[in-house]
């Protein structure tokens, strides 16, 4: 999935013409230079964006009905579950219900011998031209064998600004939200972030 970009959170480069036009719309005399006006406006704008980024936390945007898999589950069962729920991945828990990893399509593909995410046609071509499809590598293996670990997780009070930074730094598409005992209580995905950014973008225009 492409990195989320939202115009509402990209600092605006204000031109002198913008400043002059803005000053003309303000009634009365203003004892301030256009340069000072621009600097104050840009600083206020940046602070407002930062305030908005810190106003939403994980517990306000996360999906609470978390689909997770056991690390001892066979890969075929995990694949069936993810396909049934129409999701591409989820947290992996141990026998105590604590998050110990994350499994996703990328982990399955990596186990099948792909370094990068292939297209469906690349998968089909490889299988059609091979006497034994690479999917056979997934037999007799468990989720724990291929999951990504240690997991990148967060608490429910992490802000969306910090979450966005985690997504960019670790190139992940989902973030399990855990309680103090490392048990999953929610999930934040890139889609959740996009929706929250859209909401904040609309709010910033009010």
Image (spheres, rainbow, N blue to C red):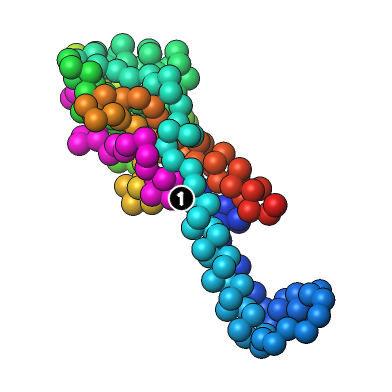
> Which residue: 51% across, 36% down?
191
Image coordinates of residue 162 in percent, x first then y, are 38, 49
In the picture shown, does residue 72 fall above or below 87? above
The boundaries of the magenta stretch are 144-164
In the picture shown, does residue 77 fall above or below 91? above
Secondary element type, mark 1:
loop
> Which residue: 49% across, 51% down?
53
State how many labels appear. 1
- Please say whether residue 150 is visible from this viewpoint: yes
Q: Nearer the viewer, residue 139 or 188?
A: 188
Disc 1 crowd rating (10 Å Cα; few below 14, some 14-19, many 20+) is: some
> Which residue: 42% across, 37% down?
58
- Please say whether residue 147 is visible from this viewpoint: no
Residue 183 occupies quadrant: top left
In the picture shown, does residue 126 fall above or below 47? above
Residue beneath disc 1: 54
Residue 20 occupies quadrant: bottom right
């Amino acid at each position: 999935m492409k990195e989320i970009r939202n115009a509402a959170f990209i600092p605006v480069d204000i031109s002198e013409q913008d400043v002059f036009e803005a000053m003309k719309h303000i009634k009365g005399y203003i004892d301030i230079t256009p340069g000072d006006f621009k600097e104050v406006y840009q600083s206020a704008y940046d602070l407002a964006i930062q305030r908005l980024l810190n106003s939403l936390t994980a517990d306000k945007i996360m999906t609470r009905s978390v689909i997770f898999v056991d690390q001892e589950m066979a890969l075929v069962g995990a694949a069936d579950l993810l396909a049934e729920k129409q999701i591409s991945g989820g947290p992996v828990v141990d026998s105590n219900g604590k998050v110990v990893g994350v499994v996703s399509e990328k982990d399955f593909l990596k186990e099948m011998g792909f370094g990068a995410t292939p297209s469906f046609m690349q998968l089909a071509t490889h299988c059609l031209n091979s006497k034994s499809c690479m999917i056979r590598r997934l037999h007799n293996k468990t989720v724990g064998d291929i999951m990504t670990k240690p997991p990148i997780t967060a608490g429910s009070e992490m802000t969306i600004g910090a979450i966005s930074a985690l997504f960019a730094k670790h190139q992940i598409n989902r973030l399990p939200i855990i309680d103090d005992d490392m048990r999953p209580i929610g999930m934040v995905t890139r889609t959740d972030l996009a929706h929250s950014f859209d909401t904040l973008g609309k709010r910033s225009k009010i």
